[in-house]
Image (tube, rainbow, N blue to C red):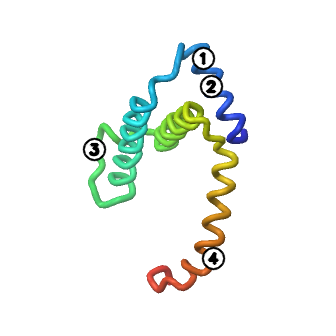
Amino acid sequence: MTLKEAQKLVDDWINTTGVRYFNELTNMAILAEEVGEVARIMARRYGEQSEKESDRNKDLGDEMADVLWVLICLANQTGVDLTEAFKRNMEKKSIRDKDRHRSNEKLK
C-alpha cells in the first residue's frame, strides 16, 4: 500500500464508518497520546524500565499503526500529500546529512 492509498483509505473510512474527522487540535492530542503509548512499550520492553505484567501483551505494531492512522488523519485534514512530503524530506536529509553521520565519532 502506498502513502497515497493509505490516505484515501483513511479518508474513505472516516467519511463512512467514522462519520467525520475529529478537529485538528483533538487529533493532535490523540497523536500525542498514541506516541506516548509507543514510548511506554519501548521504554519498558527495550529500555531500562521494568515491564509491567499489564504491558506484556501490548502489540507494538498495533500501537505504531495507531500513530500512523492519526498522522494520516492530520495530513488529510490539512491538505498534506504525505507521498510528496516524504519525498521532499528524504531529499532534504540526503543533502543535509550526506556526510554528517559518517563523521560522527559517537556512531563509530
Labels 3, 1: front one? 1
**Residue 20 percent across, percent down from the top left:** 53, 17
Q: Which residue is mark 2?
A: 11
Labels 3, 4: front one? 4
**Disc 3 from disc 4: Cα separation:** 41 Å
Q: Are marks 4 and 2 in contact (CB under 8 Å)?
A: no
**Residue 96 percent across, percent down from the top left:** 59, 72
Q: Secondary structure at mark 3?
A: loop
**Disc 4 from disc 2: Cα separation:** 36 Å
Q: Earlier in the sequence, mark 3 or mark 1?
A: 1
For residue 47, side relative to residue 93 (left or right): left
Q: Residue at x 65, y 72 (%)?
A: 95
Q: Are marks 3 and 4 in contact (CB under 8 Å)?
A: no
Q: Which residue is mark 3?
A: 52
**Residue 48 percent across, percent down from the top left:** 30, 60
Labels 2, 3: front one? 2
Q: Are marks 3 and 1 in contact (CB under 8 Å)?
A: no
Q: Is residue 101 above or below residue 28?
A: below
Q: Is residue 50 above or below residue 30?
A: below
Q: Which residue is mark 4?
A: 98
Q: Which residue is mark 1?
A: 15
Q: Secondary structure at mark 1?
A: helix
Badge 4: few (under 14), some or many (20 or more) residues near its Cα, within 10 Å?
few
Q: Please name whichever residue, 20 or 33, is drawn nearer the observer in this view of the structure.
A: 20
Q: Residue at x 57, y 14 (%)?
A: 17
